Amino acid sequence: MTAHACRICSSPDHDLVLDFGDVVLADAFLPSAAAIAGEQRYPLTLVICRQCFHLQIKEVLDPKLLFSEYVWETGIPASIRRYCHEFADAVLGRAAGSATPSIFEIASNDGTMLKEFRSRGCDVIGVDPARNIAQKANAAGIPTVADFFGERVARDLLARHGQWDIVIARNVLAHVADLHGLVAGLRLLLATEGTAVIEVPHLLNMYRELQYDQVFHEHAGYHSLDSIVRLCGMHELVVFDVEHLWIHGGTIRAYVAHAAAGRQPAVAVAQVLAEEEATGILGLVAWKQFGERARTQKRLLRAELSSVRAAGKMVVGYGASAKGQSMIQFCELDEQLVRYVADKSTMKIGKLTPGSHIPIVSPERMRADPVNVVLVFAWNFAQEILEQESALRARGAQFLHPIPEPHYL
Ligand SMILES: [Zn+2]
């Protein structure tokens, strides 16, 4: 396989979709201005495979660089807790066999999801590469192996614990460069009649809503249902059902079984595949346009921010998420245009944003300031932010949603 080969079909032929230039890793928040001199930049390029139309970034960085001290924790927003409850309902409703199936989760983070299943009487175990977060999960009583999941870890777990009724892989397919290693490992651990659940941000929403800010080094690939079906098929696995969800700006949840189990696919599978085909995301033209749309959005956003700043207004950002850093760097925003970024995470407050060096402050600080415009980087939590900041809004602050073109909420 050549360095830039498609991670699904191995073809070396690709087209450029979007070039971000040299950017700092989206999670590399700086503890202080003194750390700026040591910042590392890496090229970031979104490309599409000319053979199977899989979207991926060209660059492969050492995963240890990306994930060993991951700062995002699932425990934070209230909407995440609701999501975990609904997830367990949906998955237990579709699993064949036991009412309390055994659960294995790949990239289990701080164990928030596994806690939900354990409270329902299921045996659980997780694996996560971020040592600090795996430790936290273990301390909270959720058994978690601190490692990168793949075939090697799967064989080790198989020898020690056997197979699992349900294998969960939420928002992890996007993070791995070795897709075939991940799926082969998942297959090893999945019981003959078991169900695997794969969730990914849906490429269809990324395309429609111009979510180019989902593109950063931690996300190696961007998946359609078509790409999941293709990948699973190469490992004798089938997608037998699919659901659309609101999380992460639009997600698909694919239910996967061993092909040998003979589960009949639900009609939803063919429907989503047909929708993907109809919008053009399984082709080259739509993605050429996507690149043009992103460059236009950058121009419009910069023009709007420059104009409100020229009028003497105070502009701040909300949500120091990784994807916010991707947009900030792509649009070349800085402290002149966005005074600071407010965020609830105590792991981020007091730090500077990577590459752009904008200070991160608490939401309390934002509420105490005469803010005129709040640029919502965490647009997937826009509704929650509007409700939470209703007092700021009542004082006349406007909330600017950046995509697919900048608009006030
Ligand atoms: Zn391909």
Image: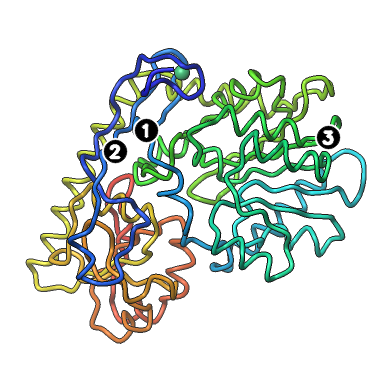
- What residue lies at 27% left-to-right and 51% top-to-bottom? 24
Nearer-N-terminus badge (2/1): 2
Residue 196 lies in what quarter of the image? top right
Amino acid on which the number 1 mark rests in the picture: Ile
For mark 2, give the secondary structure. Answer: strand
Is 129 placed above or below 191 here?
below
Q: Position of residue 389 (x, y in %)?
A: 41, 76
For mark 1, give the secondary structure. Answer: strand
Furthest toward the left, the residue is 310
Is 387 placed above or below 91 here?
below
Q: Which residue is mark 2?
A: 44
Nearer-N-terminus badge (3/1): 1
Q: Which residue is mark 1?
A: 57
User: What is the CA distance from the residue labelled 3 to the residue labelled 2?
Assistant: 38 Å
Mark number, residue 191: 3
Amino acid on which the number 3 mark rests in the picture: Ala
Is 201 placed above or below 3 here?
below
Which color scheme does this rendered protein use?
Answer: rainbow
Q: Disc 2, disc 1: CB below 8 Å? A: yes
